[in-house]
Image: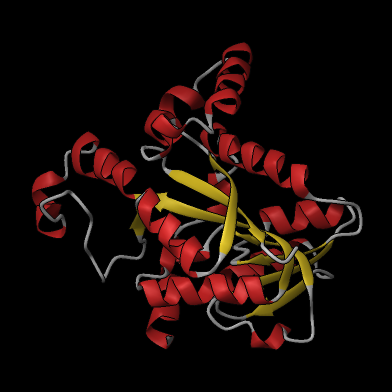
Amino acid sequence: MEDHKEKLTEFYNKFNENKRLDHRHGQVEYITSMKYIHEYLEPGDKIVDIGAGPGRYSLQLKNEGYDVTAVELVRPNIGMLKAKDKDIRVIEASATDLSMLDDKEFDVAIMFGPMYHLYSEEDRLQALKEAKRITKKFIFVTYIMNEYSVIEYAFKDNNYKQIKDKLDEDFRIRDPEAIFYQVRIEEMDRLNELCDLELIKRFASDGPSDYMRSTINAMDEETFAAYLDFHLKTCERKELLGASSHVVDILKIRSA
């Protein structure tokens, strides 16, 4: 656990997650995710943001008047979050152990980071079970997709020869030392089934945006508005989901 935390701390000391969402290609992900979150929130809902990072979602939802608890493991991210709002409630913890929240009950859980960094199915399953245990209504879970990573990094960026030993015969990425873990749709379905969570909606939060970073960032306002409209109208299409960089499951607690 400590080795995992050290790896993440080293990574996020170098990579500013907050700035990623400032660029236009990152705004697509943020705008899309917030659109769907707002569809399922009700006034007075209590929200837990598990793996809150530097707090882009936590802080916005808190500013909108929701009762928000941010859970984050990596101290550089906690520092950025607290620097923006010293009054926000922050818990330093792993997504796989939320026992410090046993006395709390939340309406909605947001998990837009943990599944990126949990390599074993056991850990991913545990994280989902922990979120389910403290949540009454809905869980939002984001994954990084396998095919996106292969297309983007192995072939588009021409790194195939350097990483071919980390690809199995079906081009499934197998690298236990990697900082990110990539999935396929059937793995997401398996986790939901094992956790007895009902999938009510699945969408691509950014679709092809990551493939087109420089193009999207250079768009004029009218073209970007049209691209965003196109994305929002196609982000649930099943034939596009697997090749998106990020896919979000909206899960219902069956007893809700």
The answer to whether residue 9 is seen in the rendering is no
Q: How is the image coloured?
A: secondary structure
User: Residue 107 at x, y = what percent?
Assistant: 78, 64
Instruction: From this view, report whether residue 228 is shown above or below residue 114.
Output: above
Image quarter where the C terminus lies is bottom right
Between residue 138 and residue 119, name the one nearer to us: 138
Q: Residue at x 45, y 70 (%)?
A: 124
User: Residue 82 at x, y = what percent?
Assistant: 73, 69
Instruction: From this view, report whether residue 78 is shown above or below residue 213.
Output: below
User: Residue 113 at x, y = what percent?
Assistant: 53, 61
Q: Residue at x 46, y 32 (%)?
A: 209
Instruction: From this view, report whether residue 147 is shown above or below residue 18.
Output: above
Instruction: From this view, report whether residue 139 is shown above or below residue 90.
Output: above
Q: Residue at x 65, y 64 (%)?
A: 80
Based on the displayed image, in which of its 4 quarters is residue 54 positioned? bottom right
* In this rendering, position of residue 92 left or right of residue 135: left
* In this rendering, position of residue 149 left or right of residue 197: left
Between residue 210 and residue 244, name the one nearer to us: 244
Between residue 152 and residue 99, name the one nearer to us: 99
Q: Residue at x 53, y 33 (%)?
A: 236
Based on the displayed image, in which of its 4 quarters is residue 159 positioned? top left
